[in-house]
Amino acid sequence: MFLRIGIFIVSTVVFTCLLAVLQQKINLDFETISLPQLAPAAGFIIISLIFADMNFSVNITFNRVIAIKILMAFVIPLLLFSISFFAGKQAGLSIKLTENLQSVVPGMFMGIIIGAAGEEIGWRNFLQPILEKKYTVLIASIAVGTIWGLWHIGHYKNGLLFMVGFLIFTISASVIIAWLLRGTQFNITIAAAFHIAVNLGFIAFFKNSLTDSRLMIINGVVWLIPAIIVTVKGY
């Protein structure tokens, strides 16, 4: 198992670097689509080609329960980001909502969908299930959230405090996603909907203050609270 996880992580990192270079070479705007977001899906494909016995598929089944969870997956992140934003306001941070959001999002939306699916095929369609074969859902979620957060190497330049807040956020988000995925056989549409909402939340509430360490710490704490609640409630 650890060999497969290791190959997946290494493949994902390599493809992240290659796709970042490609994005720069072809001068593709990151606000249109972020090619490195496809790296986890590429890592999943590599694993599937090397190990024929993996038997991992992408679950996109749809029913009433899945529809409700997709709606929850879309609403929860936006609600938590709005709470973080207003908490930051109350703390005296100089933050503001993204202006002309209605004209900004449409041009980015297809890229957001593709990028979210590209990441979740790796994180929640491969890494989470394989870790759950050996560990509890909580431990698997914390591991996936940590790897997911550390993979965002572009944020390292914002400093240690920022990364602490960002990791609290990604781990908490991972725990909440795992709770939503319970009983759905890791339905990719739920995870992707959650990731899409996360990206939209960052654009709407954090775009003008994305490097603010204090805001990221506040956001991490806000996300940690529901993560603890679903953990106590149980999976």
Image (tube, rainbow, N blue to C red):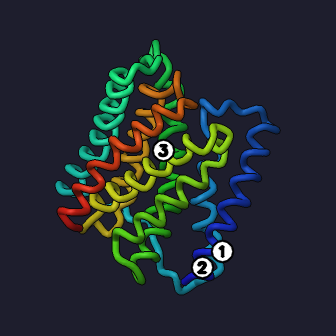
Q: Which residue is mark 1?
A: 7
Q: Position of residue 24 (x, y in %)?
A: 78, 37
Q: Earlier in the sequence, mark 3 or mark 1?
A: 1
Name, please, the residue furthest toward the bottom.
53
Crowd tier of the residue under label 2, counting other residues whose Cα lies within 10 Å: few below 14, some 14–19, many 20 or above: some
Crowd tier of the residue under label 1, counting other residues whose Cα lies within 10 Å: few below 14, some 14–19, many 20 or above: some
Q: Which mark is residue 4?
A: 2
Give the CA separation, mark 3 to mark 1.
28 Å
Residue at image coords 40%, 57%: 174
| Amino acid found under the numbered disc labelled 1 | Ile
| Amino acid found under the numbered disc labelled 2 | Arg
Q: Which residue is mark 3?
A: 165
Compared across the picture, whether 157 is left or right of 103 comes to right
Relative to 43, does residue 136 appear above or below in the rendering? below
Q: Quadrant of residue 92?
A: top left
Compared across the picture, whether 183 is left or right of 7 comes to left
Q: Secondary structure at mark 1?
A: helix
Q: Secondary structure at mark 2?
A: helix
Marks 1/2 in contact by CB < 8 Å: the verdict is: yes
